[in-house]
Amino acid sequence: MELRSFCNMRTVTNSGPTTLAKGVSPKPAITIWLIEDNHTFRKTVARVLNTSEGLECSQQFSNAEDALDALAGGAVPEVILLDVELPGQSGIDAISVIKSIAPSTRIVMLTAFDDHDKIFRAICAGASGYLLKTAPVERIEGSIQEALHGGAPLTPQVAQKVLKMFSGMAQPKQDYGLTAREQ
């Protein structure tokens, strides 16, 4: 994980207050929760998201159990960015519980792990997307929008692995014992 490069990827500028036409209310920000055990990475991602127009990282958790307690208490985000390896319950195991409490919440895995098993298990459990932590910040921001609008955001490396997994599942051509002439 290149935390230094992630931290330096975003330059925030403030061009002053935005004025809206009379009677026009601002579009509400997309509510995001971040479940990540690495304190520095979690705080950095939350800061970047909170400086992005239309996004609000309203909750941050270092483990799945605390996030599940908050969900059970009635708070429901639109999108959750979820790490795979967490202390206590894993992110993958938490997906089905999150979906049972908040079925409309989109879950995008944000992790360093790109092995076939974790990708497959996360998607089967109900993840809407799977990003590697090395993804550019613009990709993470765009993936939130993409997942919220029904898309399935994947980093290119993960997409390639998913395609290979599915191509390996293809049924082999059946041999019916036909000769070359009969075929």
Image: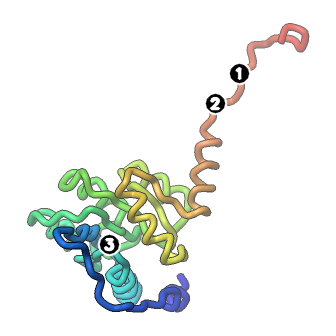
In terms of depth relative to the viewer, which is nearer, 70 or 55? 55
Which of 101 and 48 lies nearest the eye of the viewer? 48
- At x 21% / y 68%, what residue is drawn? 24
Residue sitting at x 38%, y 50%: 150
Which residue in the rendered view is the most extreme toward the top? 182
Crowding around mark 2 (Cα neighbors within 10 Å: few <14, some 14 to 19, many 20+) is few
Image vertical order of residue 74 relative to residue 34, above or below: above
Quadrant in which residue 160 is drawn: bottom right
Describe residue 139's horizontal placement relative to residue 84 as left or right: right
Residue 57, position as x, y percentages in the image: 28, 76
Amino acid marked by disc 2:
Gln
Find the residue positioned furthest to the front.
22
Q: List x then y, in percent, for residue 146.
A: 42, 58
Which residue is label 1 attached to? 174
Instruction: Give the SS element for disc 2.
Output: loop
Q: Which numbered dot is residue 171?
A: 2
Q: Quadrant of the C terminus?
A: top right
Q: Is residue 72 left or right of residue 35?
A: left
Q: Amino acid at mark 3?
A: Gly
Q: How many marks?
A: 3
Q: Position of residue 78 (x, y in %)?
A: 26, 62
Residue 39 pos. (x, y %) = 35, 87
Q: Can residue 122 be seen?
A: yes
Task: Between label 3 and label 1, give the one nearer the viewer.
Answer: 3
Residue 54's tag is 3
How far apart marks 2 and 3 lie (CA) works out to 45 Å
Q: Are marks 3 and 1 in contact (CB under 8 Å)?
A: no
